[in-house]
Every structure is written in structure tokens, then in C-alpha cells.
Amino acid sequence: MHVRRDPGGVRFQANLLEALRVCLWTRLAMRVLWPVGEGEAPGAEGLYAVAESIPWEDYLTPSTTFAVEASLQKSEHAHSGFVALKIKDAIVDRMRARAGSRPDVDSRSPDVQVVAHLSGTWLKLALDLVGEPLNRRGYRIRQTTAPLKETLAAAVLRAAHFTGEEAVLDPMCGSGTLLIEAAWMAARRAPALGRSFPVERWPELGPLARPLLVDLRAEAKAAQRPIAIPLWGFDRDEEALGAARVNVRAAGVTGPVRLEEADVTKGLPLPPDARGLLVTNPPYGDRVGTGGQKGMKSFYFQLGERFEALARFRAAILAGNPAFESAFHHRPSERRELWNGAIPCTLLCYPAPVDAAASAPPARRPRGRRTPKG
């Protein structure tokens, strides 16, 4: 499969079976798009001309509902709604001319979601294979303030080189997203196994996609395995733990995921031989009642002290506060820039303190003053 990285995503060549496998198994993508055409589209007339040139009768029928979603980048147009409206008009006019009547628009749950991206005057048109964004796995029943998206949690675990074979600890687990994503990775569970896709309702591709998805879902169910690792989650907020328990139950991982109320800065009730991956998303601002930025630095310093006590855990920490790294007072072995919504973050990876100490060069002895021979 040929893959090319684009801003905000990747482009790849695939047949229908491969594209559907991506829809079912991707842990990182929010949506999977099927390109149908592109072209130079200056002004309102250009938008209409490019959209009208697409053979929409191959993807729609008069009884198929559709909707158009548009995004703009450095465009002459000020409103994405206007761009979407011109494309919708072109689709309706072409369908009326080719099929004798027009399909209806359904903005909530369309059979076919048309996605338009206008960069300057270059218009790209695609169809959304998956519909509802893929970060919505179905297990987030309750959430806390500023929850971590499921796709970002999976990206953090992937960047931390988690393979599902080591124990996981989240000392500030919030609503449990990192723990659940780690549990599903350990279970080899396809993230979209429990949902259907709009492509199954498309007039032309639907009859081809449905039997392929039957086989792919059966294959995904057969690939699952029991979770053989412990996953520990702690939080000092009772409300957050309540949300985590509900979500863990909805995700079907109540057995391996163990949740308990505890304050990480005062110690965690872990088995004495516990080891594995510590992965967490600590507060970025003053949400821990510590008194402004100075208090946050003190809180991060306490986390660094506590990390030394967790000697057998390597760590992956998603830091959204620029003060975190220096206050944590450990040197990361890896770093990666990520975005949590509109917040720039840094994923900092640290070796286990015992491993870091073992690999550190021996301390140099101070050179004493020689006593001259007399």
C-alpha cells in the first residue's frame, strides 16, 4: 500500500477491501475518505463547475440522502457554509438532469456524506466511508472536564511503543480513556468492531461493501484474545473515578482494569514488584487547586519525585504546560510534538529510573590534591 503524509492526515492507495479494513482497525484516524474528484475552482462559478463535473449518479440515487461538509484554507470565500451550498446545488442539478429527480439533504444522518476541502482555489471532493468520527468508540458514557480523545490516547500509546505485552499504570486516569485504549490494544480488539458504516448504504459500493465487512468483522472477532496484563488506574477525584468505572464497564474491560482512589503525590497502593508503562495526561492548568502557575510547577515537581519511587516503570507523559518538563526534573529519552485539540502538547518519554541509573555513566570522583613527597 502506497502511503503519503499530507497536512492533517495521510493519503494512500487501496482497493475497497483494504479501505474497509482500515475503517475497522485504525486507532488513530478520525475519518476515512474516498476521493471522487478535484480541480481548480475560482469563485462561486468555479465551485459549481468542479462539483457538477463529478458523476454523482455513480454514488447517489434520488432516494439516497446526502449532506455536504466544507473546510477552507487560505480561501477567497469567508464562509464554509457558502462553499457547501454551491456544491450542494451542483449535486442536485446534476442528479435532476441525469436521474430525473433530486436526492434529499439530511444533515444529521445522511446516507452519503460529501466532504469538500478548498485550499486557495483548489477544490477536493471526497465521500466519507465511516460517517460518525472514528474517535467515538462507543464506550465513553460519562466524561470529565477536558477529556482526552480516544484517537489521541491511542496515538500516545503507539508513540510510547506499547505493544499490549506490559502492565499499564495511569496515576491520574480521569475518565479512563488511556486505560481503555491500552486494554483494547492488549485484547487486539478492532476499535470500530461494534459499529456500521454509511458505505454499506451507498447505491453502488454498498452491495460490494456489505459482504466484505461481514468477513472482516468475523476475522476481527477471531483475532481477539484475553487481556493478560494488569492495568491500574488511580485518581483523587471521586467523580472522575465514577466516570472511569462507567466507561470501563461499557468497554467490556472491567476485569483487567483496576480503579482506585489515590493521590499520586502521596503514593500509590501498587504491588511491590509492579513494573511496566506509566502513561498519563496530567493537568495543564490550575485544575488541581494548587494556586496558579507556581502551584502547577510545585505539583509537577512532586510528580517527578514520585516517579523516582516507581523505579520499574518507564513513562510516557503528555505535557500541555510548557513548565512541565523542567519542573519534572528528569531527562526524557524521546519527545514528540502533538496537539490535544487546539492545545500544543509534548509527549515526553522517560526510561524506568532503575534502567536510567544503570545506563548512566559512573560519577567521576573528585580529584584530591596530591601531597608532595618531602
Image: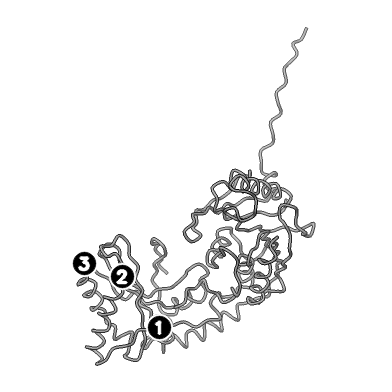
Mark 2 residue type? Lys
Q: Residue at x 75, y 54 (%)?
A: 267
Q: Is residue 199 left or right of residue 174?
A: left
Disc 2 to disc 1, C-alpha distance: 20 Å
Quadrant in which residue 67 is drawn: bottom left
Q: Residue 150, how many percent across, how many down? A: 55, 68
On the image, numbered disc 2 is attached to which residue?
Answer: 124
**Is label 2 or label 1 in front?**
1
Vertical comparison of 372 with 303: above or below: above
Say whether disc 2 or disc 1 marks the residue closer to the N-terminus: 1
Disc 1 to disc 3, C-alpha distance: 28 Å
Say whether disc 2 or disc 3 marks the residue closer to the N-terminus: 3
Q: Which mark is residue 18?
A: none
Q: For the view shown, which residue lies furthest in the top direction? A: 374
Say whether disc 1 or disc 3 marks the residue closer to the N-terminus: 3
Q: Residue 105, how many percent across, how many down? A: 35, 84
**Is label 2 or label 3 in front?**
3
On the image, numbered disc 3 is attached to which residue?
Answer: 42
Vertical comparison of 284 with 25: above or below: above
Mark 3 residue type? Pro
Colour style of the rendered protein structure = one colour
Q: How many marks?
A: 3
On the image, numbered disc 1 is attached to which residue?
Answer: 110
Q: Locate the C terminus and report the quarter of the image it occupies.
A: top right
Mark 1 residue type? Pro
SS category of the residue bearing label 2 = strand
